[in-house]
Amino acid sequence: MAGAKSQKRIESEAATRAAEFARIAAFDLGRATDMAEAAKADGLQHPTVHLLIGLRLRDQGRLEAAIEEFGLGLQLDAEHAPLMTEVGVCLLELGRRREAGRVLGVAVKLAPQAPRTNFAYGWAAERLGSLDAAESGFKRAIAFDPNYADALAGLSGLAVRRREWADARGYAQRAAAIDPRQTDALMNLARADLGEGEPRRAEQRLREIISLPHLNPQARTNARFVLGDALDAQKRYAEAFAVYAEGKAEMREQFAAAFGGARENAAYEGAREILAEFLDAPADAWAARAPSPPPVEGEARGHAFLVGFPRSGTTLLEQVLATHPDIVDLDERPVLIDAESEFLTVSGGVRRLAEIDSARLAPFRQAYWARVREFGVEPAGKVFIDKHPLSTIRLPLISKVFPAAKVIFALRDPRDVVLSCFRRSFNMNAAMYAFNTLEGAARYYDAVMTAGEVYLEKLPFAVQRIRYEDLVADFDGQAGALCDFLGVPRTEALRDFAATAARRRVATPSSTQVGRGLYGEGVGQWRNYAEALAPALPILTRWVEKFGYEPD
Amino acid sequence: MSRTDATAQPRSTEDALLQPALQAARAGDMAEAKRLARRAIAGGGQHPALFNLRAMDHEDNGRLDEALADLTRASELGPGDYSVLNALGLCLGRLGRPEEAVGRFEAALALRDDFAPAWFNLGGALEQLGETARAVNAYAKAAELAPGNALAWSNLAWLAARRGDRAAAESYARRALALRPGLPAAILTLAAVDEERPLAAEAMLRGLIGRPDIGAQEQALALGQLGDALDAQDRPHEAFEAYATGNAIARDEARPRFESPGRPTVQTTLAWLVPWAEALNAGVWRAGAEVAAEPGPPAAHVFLLGFPRSGTTLIESALAAHPDVVSLEERNSLTAAARDFTSDAAALSRLANAGPADLAFYRADYWQRVMASGVELAGKVFIDKNPFNTLRLPLIARLFPRARIIFAVRDPRDVVLSCFRRRFNLNPSTYELLDLRRAAAFYDGAMTFAEVMTPKLGLAGRRLIYERLVADFEGEARAVCAFIGVEWRPDLADFAGRARRGDVASASAAQIARGLYADGAGQWRRYRGELAPVLPVLAPWVRTFGYDPE
């Protein structure tokens, strides 16, 4: 009894001290954290102690260590919503979106009125592409704390995606009036300037943003890409190119540790390796169309892979098709990941694939459709479109796992493609790291197209090639042909794809552009940058000719 | 801020009356506490805490005079009660008596110098008095003692911004915002220091203006700053609109204070003052002035006059760097004489007939006020800068006939526009500048008055043309030095550093801190359309001062 009593006393003492830290943290986080660290060394166990220490680790960029620290707190109180929220935030910053989504989904149920939890949930939802859930998360955060600047900035970002400029502006200004450090809000204002046809104002605003002393390096880089667009819109192409180049150089530096040095050519070499293994296997291993496998439960009525290369118009095509009542789609989600890890990320995998009996791939098919459903898409009875521009290099895998699938191959003037890859910032991975130099982008393009041409020649796919420029010039004809190819009735409704894009709120770099409707201004852009593109042109000439574009 | 947390221990005889009220206050039920206090006083209670509580009740209901009486009583009953003194200071401040408020806060701090609220309130009262440097010290002390007080940081930020110290302003404002996200005053400060980023400032300000939780004063300030941000983007039409809207809000807010029936305004004053000047018999006036002549404490005495936004701060800042010069910046040094002799024509006639003894009294009052501000006069050239003293030329001539007058002149169109654009601390004169037409009429009246009076009064005067000073600083400043009798020194040009270090209190301070500003010349052309209604009023002065009519 006495033991229990003294235990209680210790607990209440811990609670009192923790409450004191929390009170001090409200105006002096640094001091409160110092005290928490001392208390922890002293043996004090309390969720608040771990929360404070974890926050400091997070601010130091030590995200994994922070998650561990928060975890210690959760061991003391498994339902501590603030700790769970911070775990989710760190996961998001680490790019572990799905885990973050799960953790935050729980946190928001535990603390449905906590502004930060709702905000973090909205943020995760946005990163996962669920823009409606994102909006509701942000709005709830604001409902419980009208001065939540990050949530207001989040709403302005969503409005930018919907091209609702007045809303974007309103939310961004509200955010700026609460936390002038909220640079996302300022960026959204610049995007609204551009969207409303005010590139000079956008330029001025972006230069202001870039000059902010407290701006973090990634945000500054992002601002450079938008500044490039603002200069481009004013036809100041040389200046625009210089700004894009500056942005890309910064990205190269920022991600050098993860993707530079020895790993610099990883994506390029990966594509070449898969191709080499593919060519090593006897040709007949690929040529014969495998017998259609027995259906797995819940399969789609039809199945097509929309491939090509980033910035080749795949987003546009996907949006157009998604308007069709018989078609469902997923926007660049890793649904093929299980088969991919088994056969494409280990050397020798493609050789094994060449010899495999299609029946043994059934578990991968099941996993694939399960993942599709996990992302909230019900493919049964529909034609399912799996859009992933770089799935071009996965075509051998696709042909084995889904021998009956069709392939839509999106093409666009290679010079426009490479230029566009250089003008955009992407979420970084090995492939996108190649886009940090013009030549790197061109070489990677060459490697992917080389592989793609071989695969399409040797694999027994039903293929529809569609040129972006043709779609822009003759929308009805091209869209109709696609419908025929996919076996769905032609429909006028496809023309409304811009409205659909806005409603569905998709999330790739192209989505704001697609929201604008058909964008013919993307055709022949490269001519404005011909001089700057010179180093990349020799690598691309072959493809320009092959795809039938004007040599100059 | 609680006033009751530190009240003295109750004396046993009064416990029965006092305790219930105190208990209610401690429990946080202030309404009940006030009610019980009222009852206790009615029942003969005499404890300071009771009067303090009842005063709070009066104050909450706008009965400031009753509150003052109760607090005075409370402080008599408990002279050692610093919280009562603090409350007394607050009440005096609200009554527009900041000098007395300062005294009470200082008394509270003498009893307990770690009482953060009194430091904070002292800062506010000093700020009202234009005592910027002392206000900064007080706020800094408040922030040090209570680092969680967002308002202390935010006020420090605002004062840092006014003296042009951007780095300090930003760091204080961010500190305030970390404590209280969205604090309007801190946002206004950040928008003000972000002048190189007018689009960011615009965004902040538009967001702030749209917020339902900000008051009329903040709204007016935000609109004025928005005007500046739009002006910096060369969007003068929108800028003017923002200035006009902000000024209208400020005017509506201040109207009861400055336009109550029977209260003289600049307009009503000019209506009799100008005809009085025109009719004045100069001979009589000058003869009387000769009698009055009497040397003051400084070696030489200079009045720097003109109209607000005419460059007076610029020349004063420059000259004050001279080791032989001391200056006073926009303090009401002539208050007593102005109060007694400028209410109407009859009062001015009394001044004409005032004997040497009377004049000596007002002169002494003047020097006393000057020295109270900490200025060391002996052996120096003393510059009293206050553009609003232009209308007090008769007082100056009568009390100080040997004083020299520097009269700052700038393109009238730029002056009036600049006055309209600037956000002044409001007094009866600056209130007039919130309306473009009234500002122009004020300008016209003041210039007419000065033009008529200067030759009649026989004062030693010199015009200082702002545009010339900006174009050839050394040449003009040398001439001014010669006029006031000091030698030119090359370091006089370093007034920007002084504004950053010291306390230049006028609306021009932040501009001065940036260095010489030629961007002020000819601004009015960008606002030609908006200024159209007042250009005819200003045209004669454009001609008189020799500016290009176009």
Image: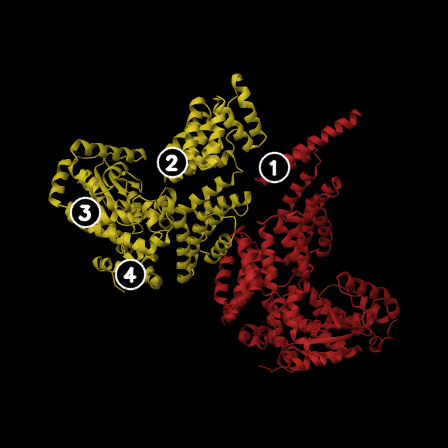
Which residue carries the number 1 mark?
A23
Which residue carries the number 2 mark?
B98
Amino acid type at mark 1? Arg
- Subunit under mark 1: A
Which residue carries the number 3 mark?
B276
Amino acid type at mark 3? Trp
Sequence-earlier tag: 4 or 2 = 2
- Subunit under mark 2: B
- Badge 1 and badge 3 both on one subunit: no
Q: Residues within 10 Å of mark 1 (few under 14, many from 20)?
A: few
- Badge 4 and badge 3 both on one subunit: yes
- Subunit under mark 4: B
Sequence-earlier tag: 3 or 2 = 2
3 vs 2, front mark: 3
Q: Is residue A537 above or below residue A266?
A: below
Q: Quadrant of the C terminus of chain A?
A: bottom right
- Image side of residue A296 versus residue A249, left or right: right
- Badge 1 and badge 2 both on one subunit: no
Q: CA distance from mark 4 to mark 2?
A: 39 Å
- Badge 4 and badge 2 both on one subunit: yes
Q: CA distance from mark 4 to mark 3?
A: 26 Å
Task: Tally the marks.
Answer: 4
Residue shown at the point (74%, 72%) measured from the top left: A327
Query: Does residue B453 appear anywhere in the picture?
Result: no
Which residue carries the number 4 mark?
B535
Towards the viewer: B225 or B1: B1
- Badge 4 and badge 1 both on one subunit: no
